[in-house]
Amino acid sequence: MASVKLTNVQKIYDNNVVAVHDFNLEIKDKEFVVFVGPSGCGKSTTLRMIAGLEEISGGTVEIDGEVVNDLQPKDRNIAMVFQNYALYPHMTVFDNIAFSLRLKKVPEDVIFNKVTNAAEILGITEYLMRKPRALSGGQRQRVAIGRAMVRDSKVFLMDEPLSNLDAKLRNQMRAEIILLRQKLDTTFVYVTHDQTEAMTLGDRIVIMKDGYIMQVGTPTEVFERPANLFVAEFIGAPKMNIMHTELKKEGSDYYVTPFGAHIKVTGEKGELLEKQGINGGEIILGVRPEHIVLAKDGAEGSIPVTLEVNEMMGSELHLHVYTEDGTRIIVRVPTIDLSEEERSRLVNGAKLSITFAGKVMHFFDKETEKNLLY
Amino acid sequence: MYKKRLTPAIVKLVCAALALVVALFFFYKAVPLIVKSLDSSGETPGFMGSIMLGFNKLFYGDNVNAAATSDSIDYGVYIFASIVFLAVSLAFLVLGLNELKRTMSFNRMADASGIEIKKEKHKTVGDILKKIGSAIVNFFKAIGNEFKDIWQTFVHGDWKTKVSYLVMGFGCIARGQILRGLLFLVFEIVFIGYMVLWGANWISKLPLDMTKLSGATQEYSEVFDAYVTTYNDNTFKILLYGVLTIFFIIGFIYTWRVNVKQNKIAEGILKSGKKLKSGKDDLKSMVDDQFHKTLLALPLLGILVFTVMPIVFMILVAFTNYSGTNDGLNNLFTWVGLDNFNEMLSWKSADGARSYSATFGEILSWTLIWAFFATFTNYFLGMLVAIMINKKGIRLKKVWRTILVLTIAIPQFISLLYVGKMFAKNGIVNGFLMDMGWIKKAIDFWGDTKNNGLLARVLVIIINIWIGIPYLMLIATGILMNIPADLYESAKIDGASGWQQYSKITLPYMMFIMGPYLLTSFTGNMNNFNVIFLLTGGTPLNTAASSTGIAVGYTDLLITWLFKIATGSGNRYYQASVIGILVFVIIAIISLIVYSLLPSVKNEEDFQ
Amino acid sequence: MKKSVSVSSIIMLVLGVLFLALGGYAIANRFMEVPIWTVNHEYLTNNFIYSSVGICCLIVGLLLFFFAIIRISKQSAEAKGAESTRHHMGMRASNAISNTAIHILLVIISVIWLIPFVCIVLQSFRVDPLCQVGYVIPKHWGFDNYVNLFVNKDEAGNVISSTLSTNGFLRWYLNTLIIALSCAVMQTIIQLCMSYTLSRFRFKMRKGLMQFMLILGMFPGMLSMIILYNVLKDLGLTSEHAVPGLILVYIASSGMGYYVSKGFFDTLPKSLDEAARIDGATRAQVLWKIILPLAKPIVIYTVLTGFMAPWGDYVFAQYISRSAPQGMNVAVGLYNWLSNDQINQCYTKFCAGGVVVAIPVAILFMCLQRYYVEGVTGGAVKG
């Protein structure tokens, strides 16, 4: 069993700067949890508190039911992969991986087996006798992972391990981490600033901002039911379109009126609005780019916009448009659905119309920015 | 995957054995001294005393070399050194055995696992020699190519080129590159003029054959109150200007070669239809793509004249008998071939005095010991101080560093001279010790010749620590601050204690970075003239070695001996040159060996 | 994990106490003259070795004691387990003890390092006697030594001339100042030219040139001295006119010392050069406008080392200037004051002269210390 439980965890620095406020989280055994957020949100600090590299100012951290606040990092039975790999430059790859085992005085033949096994899993067997400076970034990353692997620890901590790799390598390593997770079968706590990594890797995602937890949930949850505006904008690329508009209640139906259009709220969102007893008022409306479609000019619920930039992504187009009052909106249009004639229309300055369905809308309170429905 | 070499482990074990031998050697030297001090009283020896007597009987029989009185300081030093080397030996033994065990079990597992094993390449001294050999071969090949090229250019060149072989610069002028052509032409005229007027004269006299040189004149000199023979030819000047002329000739050949090449290139350019560079273009390129030549011209000239030429000259002097008496003005000197080297390295001695080689060997061994201790004590202690100051929780870091850096700020000359005088017989240290009642009469630090001047030698090493630590501390601090912090964090997570972090991360990392520096420091200390000369002047006097003609002492290095020979009675410059060349050879050999043992040294491109 | 206090810590503690006792006993013996061995030797009771052995034992005992205490407190704190306050106290306590021990050690080191300078300053104020004595604090204080550096007095104590005109200390000081200033400027220019070229340009003979200079450096510098003296003599630049001769020699061979500067230039990214050249600058302009402003630390370092070197050069200066006082520099002059025939009149003058020479150089160095450190750590080791 290797659960991790953080209760009221706080981190206050000497100059009274609060890096982490009241962090509460329960990580189940063998779960892969990702801490994600912009720079300075406290995710690395929290990870380091779990590791024991930062002193915990308040609250408790429990690993496997045992409070570890005062335990040294080596006694917490954790392993960590650093952003800059932290490989010892004067030792060979083999010795780097074997370092912690040698400190524990494990017999040499056991060490040999463990290291070669790990190397085989990671595909670095042929580099075992090289020194780190003779390796590329991706290979060094694997060595760092290997070093953490052989410790057979209960919790696997990773601090932005892919940040220093180029885009293509990053995608590749992401897949390998998923495979690794299947093989290792331990609890993972992963820190990143890249929401794509968070969405693809995590069982659950913890989104943080300025030391606070914004939302904890599965990728589906945070994508479809973001708890507040920050999460809604952070998750998903390109980010959600935000419009300031009015929610009107007419009878038992709800309507939104962005930029002169009149769109009815349909589906279960309408029912939820009814259940919550929400009346009309000024709201912040959020619609994801993939849910916006091109409409016929002048049709019911269409919004007239002007096309500014047309990004060709391959299988789809990202249209950057702006409304009459200057609000910028991004629309994702699959290329396969467009005819030649329609495509040729999409040039700079073209006048288009867009609309969106009633069931894809997200509503946020104008002041608190919280999701009205969830 | 490679199989691991056993060599590093074996090297460590060999070091352990060597250190053990040295430890035993010091102990061996200490025993008779201890026994002597026991004997000089009359009481029955205690427990320790009887053990010593036992050893003495075992190794020396009853034959103890009775010399002076109290050797307490000396055997204290010997015992201390013995203990230090014993500890070093044990450390190497433990490390070596551990590594041996590790490597052997690794290789065993590697064999059993079935993973493919390749042989590991490693550098040896043989590789370096091969490199030098191929460099020499390439050199000769290049010269051969040059000759071929010169011939080809002549054969295939047009008439302008052919004329340029005789009249330098003609081709350039004829093709419109006036500036370049004029430069070549002027140079040729100057050279020919010089050779005709003076050069040929000097060259012809180079063999320094006394019989062929022009006649002598007898003059009455008031200074010497006698008739003094002065020669019209000054052999010193002959050698000097002859060498310069040879340099000039080499320079001319090179320039002529460039001239020929220019023609070839120019023809090629014109044939392909492009334009040649004009004089203005040339000037412009001097500050652009040829800027390196512009920048290097003056410094290299200075080095050539003031560094290379003197060294070449002094190497030649080693083969003459140039000295104060044969200084070429009052007495001519000639080539003596390898006689000087024979004399220096001969085993037999002249007139019952010590042979040169014995003196040379003695001073050489002290030089090596001194360089070794000076380098490594400074290195380890400097690192220790840097780590202490750098530790978390130590306040006033800047204050400590500033105080130590002050020692560098004060000119070494003053510090060394003063500290040397501090330890004089009537100096402050003796005064202090006598005041405290710790000693009854002044210790003659710089004059005590017992045990090869051991006291002075140890003291010199200790004072050198005082001089050297601040410098090493600065460098070590700089490196320490650059060790990435996450190395330590990772080790903390892996469970390393403070001491393990130091021994497995800090220490290896620093050795990794500072390895090459240690080598330069070692060779620099071998030639460290200032410290020895200013501190002791070479005292205490080594009477046996001094019988070779020059007063030399127990703390003299080869280089201070060289200086004394050159400036002492007789001014035997030729001997100084011989020693200088031998020093160079020794340093070169040591550097070669160490470079081949070190891991591949830093790559410049890595930093750019 | 519950660990108890380990056996090794206890052994360390016991050893520490033993050594302390031994050392204390030895020191006490010195005062009480009680023999420790059954062998009764006169010299053992009051001997330098005796009390130094005692001090060594004391130091070793103290260190062992401290370390043992630290380990024991750490281990007992661990044994107590999760009692947070105790554990923190144990950690903090042991940390505090080791830090205190290190502070004490640092104080001792500082004192040892500063002693010679304190002594030299004190002795420079001693007016009677003038020769070397065995005590430090002068019995008679005065500024006479300093005054005598700059002016000559006659029997009655009246000032007759300055040492400038009699080619005494002031003349030497001025000489050295001229040499130092010229060297500082010219050497910097030459060294920067060399190191910049070797760092930035890749031409055919580059590696060969560097290896050649490495080999040149293996020759002892003494050898060139003799021949250079003869050449300078022919040019008339020796004895009284040694100053220009020295300047010439220093500057001409300064190119050999390119190593540190080159290491520094290696750390400046080449892309800066390339960007400037694309913008249209010639290589000379790149050096002048782009690289040099960035090279301020290493320029200051080179100027500083160039300035400081001539103050301490004894051998070469002495060889060139022989015994002509107009051509001597301070090193030669001060050294002569300590020769056997002059030391009894000039010892304290030497101390004063040393202080006068050292202070400006030291002050300059301390002000520019930052650059020196940067130069040493950046260039000397990496490059």
Image: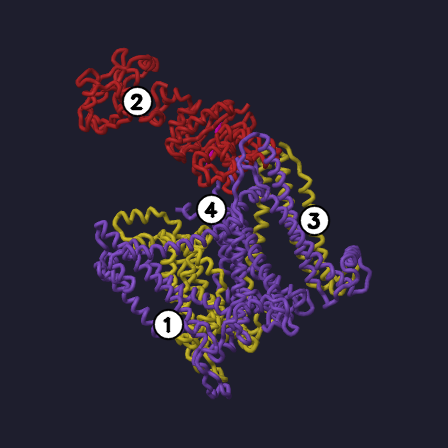
Chain colours: A red, B purple, C yellow
Chain ID of residue with mark 3? C
Q: Which mark is residue B482?
A: 4
Mark 2 sits on what residue?
A288
Q: Which mark is residue B199?
A: 1
CA distance separating discs 4 and 2: 47 Å
Residue B297 placement: quadrant: bottom left
Q: Is residue A19 left or right of residue B325?
A: left
Q: Is residue C4 left or right of residue A223?
A: right
CA distance separating discs 3 and 2: 76 Å
Name the residue at 66% across, 47% down.
Answer: B90
Foreground residue, A138 or C30? A138
Secondary structure beneath disc 2? loop
CA distance separating discs 3 and 4: 39 Å
Secondary structure beneath disc 1? helix
- Residue C310 shows up from this direction: yes
Where is B490 relative to B458, above or below?
above
Secondary structure beneath disc 3? helix
Q: Give how far across and how far down residue A65 sits, in percent.
A: 55, 25
Secondary structure beneath disc 4? loop
